[in-house]
Amino acid sequence: MKKYAFLPLIAALGLLSACEKDKPDAFVPPVVTPVTNRNPIIRDKYTADPAALVHDGKMYLYTGHDETPFPQEGYQMKEWLCYSSPDMVTWTEHPVPLRVTDFTWARADAWASQVVERNGKFYWYATVDHRTVPGKAIGVAVADNPLGPFRDARGSALITNDMTTKVNSFFDDIDPTVIIDDAGQAYLYWGNTGCYYAKLKANMTELDGPINTIVLPSYTEAPWVHKRGDWYYLSYATEFPEKLAYAMSRSPEGPWEYKGILNELAENSNTNHQAILDFKGKSYFVYHNGANGPAGGSFRRSVCVDYLYYNADGTIQKVIMTKAGVAPAP
C-alpha cells in the first residue's frame, strides 16, 4: 500500500512595530501560507475517469489507469485502481481490484466505471471493448466489500452496442453511472454523443424495461447522476475539448432542465470526467486533468479534488479548479 499525504506546512509570522510595541493591537495575526499543492492527488501513477463512493466513514476512489508510455498517444488501459481516504487528503492505494481480463468476454480498454452499494454488495459497472460484438460494452462485477476482489456478476455484458441504435457509433455505450432512488429503484445512465438510461432490477445485474434516450444540449459523454435534497442532478461532458455541464430534475426519469456550464476545460486534457458527492459535511468535485509533470496530458491523466458549492435554490456554482485542492476533512 502507498499513502499520499499532502499536508500543509504552516508558517506563522508575528510582526511587532517597534514604535507601537506597547500597544497590544499592533500585533499582526499569523500569516498562513500553504506551500504544498494537493492536486493532482495521485502522483506516481496516471489516473483517469474518477468515480467515488462513501462507505463506513471513508471515501473510496475508483479510477482508470492510463499506461500509455510518453510521448506516445492513444489510450492503453488494462485495469482499474482503488484508493481510500478518511479525510480527502491522505490516500491509500489498494491492490488492483478489477482488470479487463476479469471479464472473459471482453477484449480491452478499462474505461470509465462506477461502484455502487446495495444490500451489502458492491456492484462495479465498467466500460470495456467487447470481444465478439463490435464496439464498446458495459459489464457488471460484484464484491462483498468496496476493496474487492470483484468478479464478473453475469458472465456476459449488461449492455452491448447492438442494443442501442439511436446513435450509429461503436463508442456510444460507455461511461456508466448508477443511482438508486429513495424508493429503491436503480437507474443506469451511460452514453457517448447520445445519453441513455434504463431501470435495473433489484439484483442490479439485469435491465428492468426499455432503454430510453435523454436529450441534453451539446451532450458528449461522462454522465454522473446524484441527488441532493429534492433535486436530481445530471452532469456530463459537453463539446470537445470537454467542459462539464449539468441539468436538474425532480425525478431520475426527467424531464431535465439544463442549467449551464459546471466547469471549464481541465488543464492539459481534452477529456473531462467527474464524480460529485458529499463527505463529512462538505461537497466535493472529483475530476481529472493532464497536469501531472511534463509527461501529463490527454493520455496520461491525473485525478484531482476541489470543493463544490450549491446556491440556495439548489443550482450549483461553477467549480473552481485549483492546484491547492482541499483541506483535510474533520
Image (cartoon, helix red, strand yellow):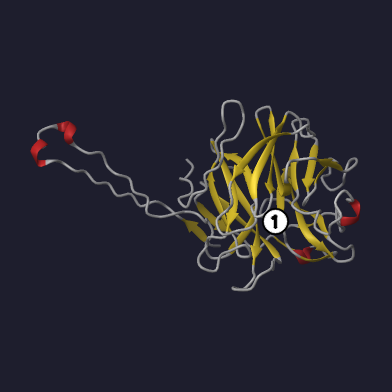
Q: Nearer the viewer, residue 120 or 283?
A: 283
Instruction: Quickly name the residue at label 1.
Output: 148
Query: Who's the residue at 84% across and 61% down the image?
Result: 135
Instruction: Give the vertical position of 242 relative to 296 (above or below).
Output: above
Q: Quadrant of the N terminus?
A: bottom right
Q: Is residue 91 left or right of residue 277?
A: left
Q: Nearer the viewer, residue 282 or 271?
A: 271
Q: Is residue 124 left or right of residue 276?
A: right
Q: Is residue 174 left or right of residue 166?
A: left
Q: Nearer the viewer, residue 304 or 114?
A: 304
Instruction: Give the vertical position of 292 relative to 33 (above or below).
Output: below
Q: Where, by quadrant of the figure, is residue 199 drawn? A: top right
Q: Is residue 296 left or right of residue 16?
A: right
Whether residue 55 appears in this view of the structure is no
Whether residue 288 appears in this view of the structure is yes
Image coords of residue 96 (percent x, y): 66, 63
Image coords of residue 242 (percent x, y): 65, 52
Query: Who's the residue at 64% across and 73% down the image?
Result: 72
Q: Amino acid at mark 1?
A: Gly
Instruction: Give the vertical position of 79 relative to 244 (above or below).
Output: below
The number of numbered discs placed on residues in the rendered structure image is 1
Q: For the residue labelled by badge 1, is the local secondary structure a helix, a strand or a loop?
A: loop
Image coords of residue 79 (percent x, y): 70, 64
Image coords of residue 288 (percent x, y): 59, 54
| Mark 1 crowd level (few <14, some 14–19, many ≥20, 10 Å Cα) | some
